[in-house]
Amino acid sequence: MPHFFIKSENKTDNIIKIEDKENYRHIAKSLRAKTGEKILLIDENKVQYECLIKEITSKEISAEIVSEYPSRRFLNFNLYLAQSPLRSEAQSIIMEKATELGVKGVYPIYTDNCALNKSVIGKKIEKWQKTMYEASKQCERAEIPSCHDLTDIKTLYDSKKFNHIIAFCERLSKLTLREYIEKTSDIFNQNNNVLIIIGPEGGFSEKEFKYFRDNNIPMLTLGDLILKAETAVITALGNIVYEYNYSRQN
């Protein structure tokens, strides 16, 4: 069922009017939706509406609410990804999969072995945000994650915004995510801000490893296999979501 983001102010009684040009164009022109078809809408309060299209005019769409309920398509803690951008379509895949796996936001970070120049990264932020927006619609996210401006590890650490900062490293660590969680049982507390850091294709530099050690940023392993950077992102996020769901059941 098509899924679109709306504002609660567009709801009057049991009718929602879709007036913004992008949603209108997608529903009426691209999908060629017709009256009587089902549509899924969600507002900024994370309320989900299952609707039937009642009318399509030249400027707006009216949808009748069949049922409404709180969305469950989000994590109870705030998961952030800090990641050194990759070339070509690999980065778009990362933005898409990070969205599917529940991140609240992505911070492109400039590292010593970063594959892209700073000027190139700055020009791609808007494109990556668009990718996250489209992925949010496709996987029925309750909210749209943010692609932040280019930054670096030190700036994120100094911000004091995060309750937990974790670096996943390919060689130096033997501590697993499960072991880390067992030692720090509050990681999934509601509204906690958790930042995971993934390096570039060439890995972190010795200077960056030293920064992690000097600032007591735990370096965790994803196992003995050497993973490409995009695979490491998906694996790390997937493991965190798994452990989060596991913790809720035990």
Image (cartoon, grey):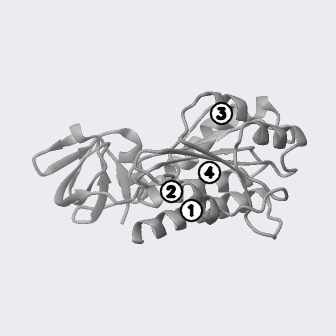
User: Type of residue at label 2?
Assistant: Ser
Marks 1 & 3, CB-CB < 8 Å contact = no
Instruction: Kindly identify the amino acid type of the residue bearing the numbered disc 3.
Output: Tyr
Q: Amino acid at mark 1?
A: Glu
Residue occupying the point 83% across, 52% down: 201
Amino acid on which the number 4 mark rests in the picture: Met
Find disc 1 in the rendering and name its residue: 182
Kind of element beneath mark 2: loop
> Does label 3 or label 2 sit earlier along the sequence?
3
* Residue behind mark 2: 185
**Label 3, on which residue?**
157
Q: Is residue 142 visible?
A: yes
Residue at x 50%, y 47% (from the top left corner): 133
Q: Secondary structure at mark 3?
A: helix
Mark 1, other Cα within 10 Å: few <14 / some 14–19 / many ≥20: few
Label 4 – label 3 distance at C-alpha: 22 Å
In the picture, measured across the screen, residue 64 lies left or right of residue 196, that is: left
Residue 20 is left or right of residue 132, and the answer is left
- Residue 87 horizontal/vertical position (percent): 79, 48
- The one of 219 and 235 positioned closer to us in this rendering: 219
- Of the residues under marks 4 and 3, which one precedes in the sequence? 4
Circles 2 and 4: CB atoms closer than 8 Å? no
Mark 4 or mark 1, which is nearer to you?
1
How far apart marks 2 and 1 lie (CA) works out to 6 Å
Q: CB under 8 Å between callouts 2 and 1?
A: yes
Residue 232 is situated, as x and y percent measured from the top left of the image, at 72, 60
